Image (cartoon, rainbow, N blue to C red):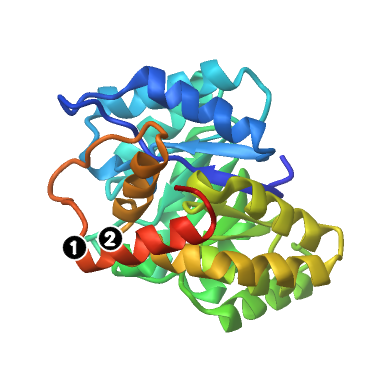
Amino acid sequence: MKFEGTYVAMVTPFDDDGKINEEGFRSNINYLIDCGVDGLLAAGTTGESATLNHDEHKKLIEILIDEVDERVQTLAGAGSNSTAEAIELTKFSQDVGADAALVITPYYNKPQQHALISHYETISNSADIPIIAYNVPSRTGINLDVDTVIELAKIDNIGAIKEASGSVDKISDIYNALLKEDLADDFKILSGEDSLTLPIMATGGTGVISASANIDAERMVKMVNSILNGDYDSAFDLHYKMLDIIRALFIESNPVPVKTAMNLMGLPAGPFRQPLADMKDENLDVLKKALKELNFI
């Protein structure tokens, strides 16, 4: 698996009763495929995985694989703060045909760096599906060190990292270390920070797993493809044109602004699950302004 291009961390649309809107989810899948994305992620953070029960979590992955029907790559959210639970979700993702599993670092537990290596190695040894490690310290309370990432790159089945630490210096350090260890061809870096996708790719990244692409997929695809093709003039232009909407989409906790924007645009999204709540009025005004400037609403 190449781990290259634009992947969308999809929202989970709910109906007014708070249940998964399967028809809406399938509609969003087709909409994003039509926008030219390279892959789709179900049951990730943007998909409100923290409030999905296990049956719902697995159902979303099954719907994604069924509706995509091999047209693009399918990623399954399979992380947990329990190694045993992460193994179960990863095995399930493999069994139903996902192309790869996204496995977040364990949250709340705050395992040591050597424990993180053991966590991912145990999962890798339990399944054959390619694994993307997900580093997002703002949500988990831990940060994968560069040396730890290099050790993960040496583990069978772990083929990429989604990096959302917010540090471009760290991306440079990871990529430099991968080059020195002759691992850069086999282990890829994917942006987990939409606004940093251009600098992350300019320093060694090969793509993005994007939340804002639920809203603005076509331009994210064009920017990422421009970078991959070495056309940085076009990439710079697209980066700055997208910057205001990306920042508006993260003005409150993801995925609240993204789902709000989708509802305003007439795309299936629906309500949030508690403890998430509606946006503050002043932030909603900022979001609406950004959407209107792009003629999205």
Does dot 2 land on a helix, a strand or a loop? helix
Cα–Cα gap, marks 2 and 1? 6 Å
Mark 1 lies on residue: 280
Give the residue furthest to the right. 230
**Residue 160 rendering spot, x and y as whole percentages:** 61, 53
Within 10 Å of disc 2 (Cα), the crowding (few <14, some 14-19, many 20+) is: some
Asked whether disc 2 touches disc 1, contact meaning CB atoms under 8 Å apart, the reply is: yes
**Residue 153 rendering spot, x and y as whole percentages:** 63, 59
Q: For residue 115, which quarter of the picture?
A: bottom left
**Residue 182 rendering spot, x and y as whole percentages:** 79, 66
Give the residue furthest to the bottom. 169
Q: Report the front residue among 134 and 197.
A: 197
Q: Is residue 187 visible?
A: yes
Within 10 Å of disc 1 (Cα), the crowding (few <14, some 14-19, many 20+) is: few
Task: Give the label on residue 284, or none.
Answer: 2
Quarter of the image for the N terminus: give it. Answer: top right
In the rendered structure, which amino acid carries the disc numbered 1? Lys
